[in-house]
Image (tube, grey):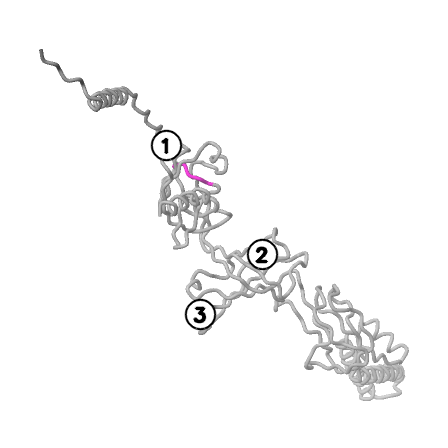
């Protein structure tokens, strides 16, 4: 009888491995598939931005509106005296300063004394007056005697006529002498007193020629002054109006005319606008700077504007008009010179748009092109969206 072979140990191991591999394969095939990830919000690009509810609180969104714009030009100039209302106060005659009644910066009233001088010309005029008064008195008495004598035929008609002629001549000389004294600022009462007392008055009063303010004082007691000297003893200016001198661009010269309204600002009063009007237009253009001088007469009833102040003025050169506009905070100025705004249709998704600007006034930019009436735009903190978009664009790079 034959005997069969016993199974080997290696075969048994191979059989077990096959069973284990089959089990693992079955387990792997039965494992459930992984769940797909939730879609993420699209990141901002350089032209589009999406804001969350909390981010929306940092900006203001509103329909674009219109604003009134007035064509205007601006320039910088300096406040100066109104040269038509400033006077160098010289004496009419030479003399020595005796007294002074005003100081630099003092307000003065027309006709009130500024200073007095002792004038040799006044002394001469006084002597002439006293002499003429004496001659006149004598001629009057002589005429009276002649008239009495003529009534009794004591003198001839010719003698009476000579006495009358002498009285008329003396009276004319006295009138001329009185007029000469009045030129020195004396009054009729002063002249009458001088004639009555036969005493000269050598003191000449120099009054203020206008109501205003003392803008310069060079007079000192004892100083010899004369008409047309190198420097006036006093200068007085009416400060109710001042001049604003400025130079405007040659290209803008045709836009200006006398009488145009001007609004003036100075650093000392930033919240106050001073009103004025163009009074003088220059006759020539500076060949170096290509600018022309424009002089504006500015009203200053309270005396707040001082000569030398730096001032900015705005000249209105045309009629006002309505146009689409955004607050300055709603326009983003880029480094390349372009101007952008952000528009939206749902107040969450915003699109950057390039616009063309016109005038800028009262805190608004005029939008000439790039947006339609009624579109919703960011009116405050538009730069926030631009920063988000620019940051996203930099991150992509």
- Which residue matches tag 2? 265
Q: Is residue 98 left or right of residue 30?
A: right
- What residue sits right under mark 3 in the picture? 290
- In this view, the residue in front, 375 or 347, is 347
Q: Mark 1, mark 3: which one is toward the viewer?
A: 1
Q: Residue at x 80, y 70 (%)?
A: 101
- Regarding residue 278, the answer to whether it shows in the image is yes
Rendered view: 161 above or below 50: below
Q: CA distance from mark 1 to mark 2?
A: 55 Å
How many other residues sit within 10 Å of disc 1, few (<14), some (14-19) or many (≥20)? few
User: Are the residues at dot 3 and dot 2 in contact (C-beta closer than 8 Å)?
Assistant: no
Dot 1 and dot 3 residues touching (CB under 8 Å): no
Q: Which residues are magenta?
A: 375-379
Q: Quadrant of residue 80?
A: bottom right
- In contact (CB < 8 Å): disc 1 and disc 2: no
Nearer to the camera, 365 or 279: 365
The residue wearing badge 1 is 40
Magenta span contains residue 31 = no
Quarter of the image with the N terminus is top left
């Amino acid at each position: 009888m034959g005997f069969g072979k016993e199974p080997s140990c290696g075969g048994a191991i191979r059989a077990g491995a096959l069973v284990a591999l089959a089990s693992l394969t079955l387990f792997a095939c039965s494992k459930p598939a992984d769940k797909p990830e939730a879609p993420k919000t699209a990141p901002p690009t350089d032209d589009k931005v999406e804001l969350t509810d909390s981010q929306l609180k940092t900006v203001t969104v509103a329909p674009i509106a219109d604003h009134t714009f007035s064509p205007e030009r601006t320039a910088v100039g300096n406040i100066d005296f109104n040269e038509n209302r400033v006077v160098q106060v010289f004496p009419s005659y030479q003399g020595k300063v005796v007294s002074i009644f005003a100081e630099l910066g003092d307000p003065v009233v027309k006709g009130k004394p500024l200073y007095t001088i002792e004038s040799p010309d006044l002394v001469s005029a006084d002597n002439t007056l006293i002499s003429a008064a004496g001659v006149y008195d004598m001629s009057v008495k002589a005429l009276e005697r002649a008239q009495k004598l003529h009534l009794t035929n004591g003198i001839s008609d010719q003698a009476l006529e000579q006495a009358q002629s002498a009285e008329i001549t003396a009276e004319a000389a006295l009138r001329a002498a009185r007029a000469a004294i009045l030129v020195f600022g004396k009054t009729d009462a002063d002249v009458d007193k001088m004639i009555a007392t036969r005493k000269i008055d050598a003191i000449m009063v120099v009054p203020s020629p206008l109501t205003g303010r003392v803008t310069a004082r060079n007079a000192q007691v004892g100083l010899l002054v004369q008409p047309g000297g190198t420097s006036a003893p006093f200068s007085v200016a009416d400060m109710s109006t001042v001049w604003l001198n400025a130079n405007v661009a040659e290209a803008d010269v045709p836009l200006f005319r006398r009488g145009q309204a001007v609004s003036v600002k100075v650093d000392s009063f930033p919240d106050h606008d001073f009103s004025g009007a163009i009074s003088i237009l220059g006759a020539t253009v500076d060949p170096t700077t290509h600018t022309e001088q424009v002089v504006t007469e500015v009203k200053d009833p309270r005396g707040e504007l001082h000569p030398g102040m730096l001032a900015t003025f705005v000249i209105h050169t045309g009629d006002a008009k309505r146009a689409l506009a955004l607050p300055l905070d709603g326009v983003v100025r880029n480094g390349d010179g372009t101007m952008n705004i952000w528009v939206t249709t749902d107040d969450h998704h915003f699109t950057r748009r390039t616009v063309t600007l016109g005038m800028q006034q009262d805190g608004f930019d005029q939008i000439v092109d790039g947006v339609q009436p009624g579109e919703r735009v960011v009116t405050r903190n538009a730069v926030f969206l631009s920063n988000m978009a620019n940051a996203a664009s930099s991150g992509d790079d």
